[in-house]
Image (cartoon, grey):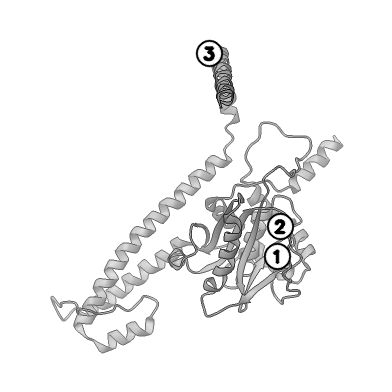
Amino acid sequence: GELDARRWVAGAMDWCTIESDPGVFTELIQRIGVKDVQVEELWSLDEESFANLKPVYGLIFLFKWQPEQDERPVAHDVDGLFFARQVITNACATQAILSILLNSPTLELGDTLDNFKGFACALDPESAGEAINSLDEVRRAHNSFNRPEPFIPEEKQVATKDDDVFHFIAYIPFRGKIYELDGLKPGPICLAEQAGKDWLATVRPHIEQRMQKYAGSEIRFNLLAVTRDRRASLQEHVEGRATRASILEDALSSAENVEAAPGFVPVELEDDEGFLALLEKGDQAELAAQLRHENRQKDTEASQLEAVEQRFAAWKAENIRRKHNYIPLCVAMLHLLAEKNKLGPMVEAAKKQQQDRRAAAAKGKASS
């Protein structure tokens, strides 16, 4: 009746808890309509960890939340910066992702986020947080990762002081400055002026300081990077090197069996001017060395692309399993075991195992 209808409407506006996993977040971003973006889990903050991930649009720090005093001043009314207070339950991870996407000027966001960005950046933090709830497509993508539950509680559970509550905050570069975006704060926190082109070098000590703060305690934390889709980057590299190799082969066509120049430093793929200068110079030994380099790198990156494709396929399979409702299968198996008179003995055996474990644990405590 009317109560069920109200409950259905409220449920339709709810945001479920989703698993913190790069495969989940990558598919979530794709479902929203954003092009060529993925999420990677980071195990280290050293330069080598970021080398193959650039460009990095933002970082997400996940940690077990605890109340703390933070005296750092917030930056108010930063022109063009999207910042939202966290007012929606269970949308913390998705909000951190949105904070990075909406503040990255080079991304193809798709119609949903482009339209939202057009007005949301002018909203105050509280209104921006409420406005996220109006993003039906984003909420549907988020809730598509909801695990099927056999029983639907009448009332939503609220976390207590004994529960583990995890929180997500974002770090981004924005117009020459580095910001921390934490939806539990009244506004963004400007950490530093960006030093040089690599914003990661500027933000690294701030995140390391935060990690060291939690490393000596029981607080668990994790770090994720929102980056360009590795498949797109590697595909561009493979095609670019193939094009270069073809040009070099034409330049070497009149000279057979040219030996590569020893000690030659190859021109990097991003250096178009250097490559043109190499062609204009016309040194056959250097051209041969560059060709060898392009073919070797092309083979390496083609192998890397295949590995990344396999990883995305594994993420897809894992996400299908996450969403699948296994409850009917479990119920059918229990019915089948009961029909064959095997369920009762299995239950009794499980009870006996539990009793034996408890007796062993009690005996161990008594002896100590």
What residue is shown with label 1? 116
Rounded to the nearest angstrom, the CA distance separating label 1 from label 3 is 57 Å
In the image, what residue type sits under mark 1?
Phe
**What residue is at 37 percent from the left and 85 percent from the top?**
273
Label 1, residues with CA under 10 Å away: few <14, some 14-19, many ≥20: some
User: In which quadrant is the N terminus drawn?
Assistant: top right
Work out whether 27 lies above or below 127: above
Instruction: Please give left or right for residue 343 compared with residue 136 in the image.
Output: left
> Which percent across, then down, holds residue 192?
62, 76
**Residue found 22% across the figure and 79% down from its top:** 263
Give SS at disc 3.
loop
Q: Quadrant of the C terminus?
A: top right
What number of labels is visible? 3
Residue at the spot x=45%, y=62% of the render?
Answer: 230
Residue 342: mark in rendering: 3
Secondary structure found at label 1: helix
Residue 108 is left or right of residue 126, and the answer is left
